[in-house]
Amino acid sequence: MTTPLFALRSPHDGADPGVPGAQRRDDRGGPARITINPTAAGTFPRSRAVWCARTLHDTRLAMGIEVIVDAREALADLVLRRFEAAARTAIAARGRFACALPGGSVAEAFLPRLAGASVDWSRVDVFWGDERAVPPTDPDANYGLTRRLLLDRIPIDPARVHRIHGEEPDLEAAAAAYARELAGTIGARPLDLVLLGMGPEGHVCSLFPGHPALRESARAVVAVHDSPKPPPRRITLTLVPLTGAELVCVAAFGAEKANAVREAVEVADSRLPVALAARAGAHALFLLDRDAASGLRGRPVVGPSA
């Protein structure tokens, strides 16, 4: 198993008093812990190896973020372990595990690995963060991609596969129907795990910077008719069902994501969709390749292996 190049632990894991910049405390008094694998330090630019990130704050909850930088294959292994752990915890507590999955490069990187997860798939409910207004068989459909990469390879109950009907001509009605399906499945509880990709400008799901959907505070699902990224017509989860999610996991690959990653992680009051989504969850995890992490700042520190 590959050891991450570096990790920023949850602010409740304790901290080494000698770590420069690692004593920022959240509202609950937990200092951030920053660790780096010494053997990997030489393969990552020292000025970027470890950075001292502030704990993000929100008026409703204070939380820490965990950031791990590694190769995609190693990150996929980590997603597998976190997925398995989250599923076991949720199933033991409530008899079911509800997750929301992405499309795009993050789905391609991680979903094939999840097909080998040791979980009780008969108790897993699968939702999507968003869908394009296309039929499920369309090459651009997130559902179709997930089916090829994951669903066709696991023994999941079809009744627990909750796809967004983006092909419906009335997107508003389809969004309302999906919101009812979500509520009918998980009730008033948040999702257990949300896996997100992000765009270069910081969008997640189909929530784009400055878009009115980002300000939605009542509806869990909305139709989008004017997405700045083609195709313009989509259906997306809002921040409402992400709020309180046990784990919001954001993955980003490539240097074009570096600026948005830096702002989401380091700017406490960022209004980027990815920052708002991360702050919405009970816990947030950023999984980055080296290029996506290249904008993160701070002084290098060598500590115990992550």
Image (spheres, helix red, strand yellow):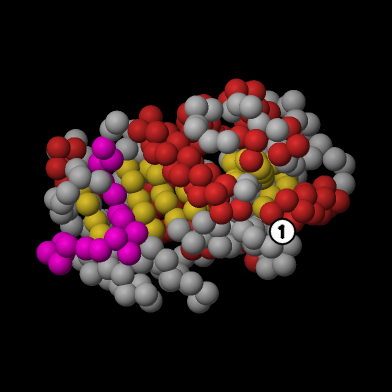
Q: Which residue shows up at 82% across the image and 50% down it?
A: 177
Main SS category, magenta section: loop
Tag 1 residue: 187
Q: Is residue 98 visible?
A: no
Q: Is residue 18 magenta?
A: yes
Instruction: Give how far across and how far down residue 138 sits, in percent.
Output: 73, 27
- Seen from the viewer's position, the closer of residues 130 and 113 is 113
In this view, the residue in front, 259 or 195, is: 195
SS at badge 1: loop
Q: Position of residue 3 (x, y in %)?
A: 26, 37
Residue at 51% x, 44% y is 88
Q: Which residues are magenta?
A: 3-20
In the rendered image of this protein, does residue 214 appear above or below residue 119?
A: below
Q: Is residue 141 above or below residue 164?
A: above
Where residue 276 appears, as percent x and y from the top left, is 52, 62
Q: Residue at x 49, y 41 (%)?
A: 83
- Count up the numbered dots: 1
Residue 30 covered by magenta stretch: no
Of 250 and 99, which appears nearest the observer? 99
Q: Quadrant of the N terminus?
A: top left
- Crowding near the residue tagged with mark 1, few <14, some 14–19, many ≥20 C-alpha atoms within 10 Å: few
Q: Is residue 132 left or right of residue 16?
A: right
* Residue drawn at x 53%, y 36% as measured from the top left: 119
Classify residue 161 as left or right of residue 150.
Answer: right
What's the residue type where badge 1 is placed?
Gly
**In this rendering, position of residue 222 left or right of residue 69:** right
Can residue 305 be seen? yes
- The residue lying toward the viewer, choosing from 208 and 251, is 251
Residue 136 sits in quarter: top right
